[in-house]
Amino acid sequence: MPDELVLKRVDFGSDAYHQLVELRNRWLRIPLGLTISKRDMEPDAQCLHLGAWLKDEAVGCVLLQLEPPTGILRQMAVAERHRHLALGRKLVALLESEARQHGLVEITLHARLEAAGFYEKLGYRRDGDVFEEVTVPHIAMRKSLG
């Protein structure tokens, strides 16, 4: 892992938060012909925002929505040219650590079907049938933190 890599929690509304919103928009919405709307961002104020930076560039992010006793993993994104660095795995590990610190016992998420294998390797299991969300197939997944 490059020495310049920094994983950190950022404050809602901060400059770093806005960098992560841009990253989410670039890698999660624009490829689908969509953009992040104010409505999409409404839950952001209730989430922990975790990001990865290489030097001054935001290269990965994930949100943890607190719904005790469960946490919801939302909006996982890693810049394409940095996906070989296992940033997604490191961000999920940080998210799970934060969840435990907040007393959460389970993480749930809606994975794009193409990403389900990634989450399965991290111990998440499929929960239910495939459904469509933001124009692409998704599957609900969960993992106990116990």
Image (cartoon, rainbow, N blue to C red):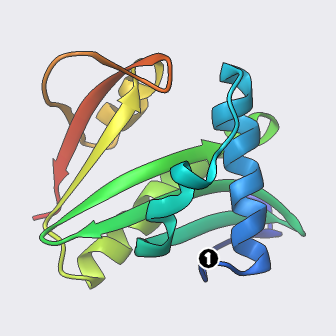
Place of residue 128 in the rendered image (x, y in percent of width and height, measured from the top left): 13, 24
> Is residue 99 left or right of 104 when viewed as pictured?
right
Q: Is residue 99 above or below residue 129?
A: below
Q: Residues within 10 Å of mark 1 (few under 14, many from 20)?
A: some
Q: Quadrant of residue 5?
A: bottom right
> Is residue 14 left or right of 107 when viewed as pictured?
right
Q: Is residue 71 above or below residue 32?
A: below
Kindly give the residue lying farthest to the front in the view shown. 39
> Is residue 18 left or right of 96 when viewed as pictured?
right
Identify which residue, 18 or 92, lies in the foreground: 18
Q: Is residue 64 above or below residue 100?
A: above
| Rendered residue at 49%/61% (across/down) | 42
Disc 1 target residue = 8
Identify which residue, 108 or 15, lies in the foreground: 15
Q: Quadrant of the N terminus?
A: bottom right
Identify which amino acid the numbered label 1 is placed on: Lys
| Rendered residue at 70%/60% (across/down) | 20
Q: Is residue 64 above or below residue 104?
A: above
| Rendered residue at 61%/54% (across/down) | 38
| Rendered residue at 90%/69% (across/down) | 56
Place of residue 87 in the rendered image (x, y in percent of width and height, measured from the top left): 61, 51
